[in-house]
Amino acid sequence: MADSAETDWVSRFADEVISEAERRAPGKPIVCASGLSPSGPIHLGNLREVMTPHLVADEIRRRGLDCVHLLSWDDYDRFRRVPAGIDPSWSEHVGKPLTSVPAPPGSPYGSWAEHFKAPLIDALAELGVEYTGISQTEQYTSGVYREQILLAMRERRRIDAVLARYRTKEAAESKEESAEYFPYRPYCELCERDLTTVTAYDDDSTELAYTCACGFGETVRLAEHDRGKLVWKVDWPMRWAYEGVLFEPSGVDHHSPGSAWIVGEQIVADVFGGRQPIGPMYAFVGITGMSKMSSSKGGVPIPSEALEIMEAPVLRWLYARRKPSQSFKIAFDQEIQRLYDEWDAVGRKVASGAAQPAESFAYDRAVRTSAGPLPETPRPVPYRTLASIVDITTGDEEQTLRILRDADGLTALDEARPRLDRAQRWVDTQLPADQRTRVRDNPDTELLDSLGETDRQALRLLAGGLDEHWSLDGLTTLVYGVPKLQAGLDADAKATPELKAAQRAFFALLYTLLIGRNTGPRLPTLLLAVGADRVRKLVGG
Ligand SMILES: [Zn+2]
């Protein structure tokens, strides 16, 4: 794919998929696909499996073409192991389909699969992801793949030959001793688990005999049997052909020699008469600073946890602006403030026409889909300002509105929502207790009494200028200006090293007097939050 400065990775994949669709299936809807296994929390790394085809499908729809984004829930996969933190008695369910395993204790959902699908379904709705969900349990148990299963069984020797090329010597030898290869595995009629072994199969009658580790065994007619599935390396290429998938990305783990993607290319062509989709590998998604208190599952957070602390367009932007092959990180720590500054800056550049094409594309894909714009915050006050305010006010709505009125002229909190709620949630769940701001109730008289005349004068100048400078800009001018005035400099004088040192010392003094630490939220925000009367009281004015 040519790397062009005038377009972005999404457009380039859409070009490629559209021209491939014209060759393979002219006139039919274009099919993009994702597959997720609800075997546990579906985390922010797994979200790339959905966001990558979503963005491509959305671009194809923006061009006026009919495009379907299939999301396969691999909920007919076996329950592999009991995760840490779950009642060990769940081990009796190992080997059953995920839809037949009870949900974790306390869950309102009917099965293990439903429990882990639910939060992602909510998150995808909030993210504006339009898709067609397919339960593989429903597909298999209703016999949708009957012909494909019979075909795969007829072609089992051909499939075995493809797989054999990648088997290690050791695996090949143990295979030698075992029985014939079968690409279909029944779930046991008695115990529901897949601890079964196919012992015989007759192509003409489709009679299949199996035994299970539980002792049960039976002979069924595969042409009527709906309690089993193709093994993963055959199941995936079968679905490429069955659904006519043209675009489906996958994680790095699917691309090693002998893995499903590699053998699938041959199996889809040799057995099912189809072709492998266009399928980029996507890289890792990392997290910075997920605090212990909210990482309840112990691992990577899930999309709904990210959406509690950031708006949907910002999360979309993280996935849109990096090529699938590039890894990136999602900030749960202080970095989220810098991330939001960057987001706001890009928004301003796009609005003024100064953005680079790639920046404009990524921003546009973040704020809207082909179905329309995503909800936005009418007055996007900087996230770091909102976080400081709700930190200081501990969420008191009246105080928060007073400060936002003084700082940005807001008349109602809803103007700052939903961003305000996200910042509030971030402060409540991610900001460590030792970094939270507590405004002093009473002046630090010991410190005030110990100050020299220069410091006292600085505090008098500050206290005396508050009312006149009562806005974010005004207070910024005031706090930087006091040390300039004391040094006999003009308000617009260039900062010298001496002046910078004097400013730093003055700021540290103010923080100590106001909040008992020598750093904190930006001073103008802090002053607005504390209120003029209380500032005067705390600085001894
Ligand atoms: Zn059994």
Image: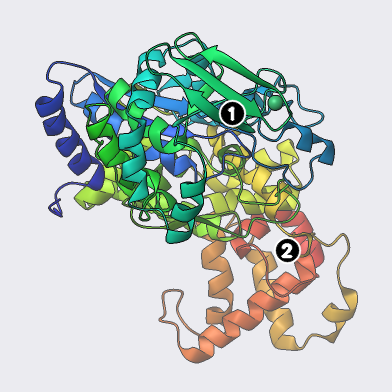
Q: In front: mark 2 or mark 1?
A: 1
**Looking at the image, which residue sits at the far bottom?**
498
- Residue 487 seen from this side: no
Which residue occupies 9% across, 28% down?
23
> Which mark is drawn over residue 130?
none
User: Which amino acid, mark 1?
Assistant: Lys
Report whether 487 appears left or right of 172.
Answer: right
Which residue occupies 45% across, 88% down?
496
The answer to which image quadrant residue 198 occupies is top right
Q: Which secondary structure, mark 1?
A: helix
Q: Earlier in the sequence, mark 2 or mark 1?
A: 1
Disc 2 versus disc 1: distance between alpha carbons? 35 Å
Q: Position of residue 232 (x, y in %)?
A: 45, 36
Which residue occupies 72% across, 75% down?
518
Seen from the viewer's position, the closer of residues 515 and 161 is 161
For ligand 1, the image quadrant comes to top right
Report whether 340 appears left or right of 19.
Answer: right
**Looking at the image, which residue sits at the far front?**
177
Seen from the viewer's position, the closer of residues 276 and 158 is 158
Seen from the viewer's position, the closer of residues 7 and 297 is 297
At label 1, counting other C-alpha atoms closer than 10 Å, the crowd grade (few under 14, some 14-19, many 20 or more) is: many
Q: Position of residue 163 (x, y in %)?
A: 36, 45
Q: Quadrant of the C terminus?
A: bottom right
Q: Position of residue 3 (x, y in %)?
A: 15, 55
The total of numbered circles placed on residues is 2
User: Which amino acid, mark 2?
Assistant: Gln
Which residue corresponds to mark 1?
Answer: 117
